Image (cartoon, rainbow, N blue to C red):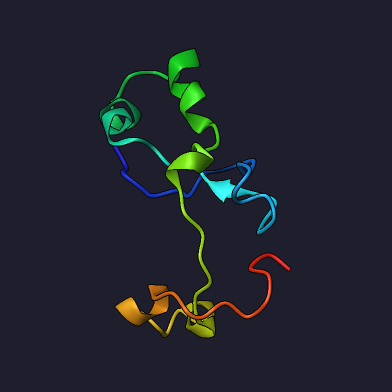
């Protein structure tokens, strides 16, 4: 068996829609074991590929440091003062 990593995207939820036309599939912790199991894909497993609930997420502006993979520290995620509308 070859174990690998894949980023799966889905349509955006209400929070992400103004930012991008897709978003990563995010799992609740209780769904992780099912996703990682060797069970064959079925409707229940495929149902996990839906947008994460927007009410369980938060959006805030961050520095442009986030645009470079060379920047890999906690400062990349620090909120910055808003300059105008976050989604304009």
Q: Nearer the viewer, residue 15 or 30?
A: 15
Q: Position of residue 69 (x, y in %)?
A: 45, 79
Q: Quadrant of the C terminus?
A: bottom right
Q: Look at the image and tell me whether residue 2 can be seen.
A: yes
Q: Nearer the viewer, residue 25 or 19?
A: 19
**Residue at the image position 61 percent from the left and 51 percent from the top:** 16
Image position of 5 (left or right of 62) = left
Q: Position of residue 54 (x, y in %)?
A: 52, 42
Q: Nearer the viewer, residue 10 or 75?
A: 75
**Residue at the image position 33 percent from the left and 19 percent from the top:** 39
Total number of numbered discs in the rendering: 0
Q: Quadrant of the N terminus?
A: top left
In the picture as drawn, the residue positioned furthest to the top comes out as 43
Above or below residue 73? Residue 17 is above
Above or below residue 81? Residue 3 is above
**Residue at the image position 54 percent from the left and 83 percent from the top:** 64
**Residue at the image position 51 percent from the left and 59 percent from the top:** 59
Image position of 79 (left or right of 54) = left
Q: Look at the image and tell me whether residue 73 can be seen.
A: no
Image position of 3 (left or right of 20) = left
């Amino acid at each position: 068996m070859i174990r690998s990593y894949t980023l799966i995207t889905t349509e955006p939820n209400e929070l992400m829609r103004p930012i991008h036309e897709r978003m990563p599939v995010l799992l609740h912790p209780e769904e992780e074991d099912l996703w990682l199991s060797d069970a064959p894909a079925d409707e229940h497993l495929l149902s996990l590929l839906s947008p994460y609930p927007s009410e369980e997420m938060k959006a805030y502006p961050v520095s442009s440091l986030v645009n470079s993979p060379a920047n890999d520290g906690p400062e990349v995620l620090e909120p910055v003062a808003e300059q105008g509308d976050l989604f304009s």
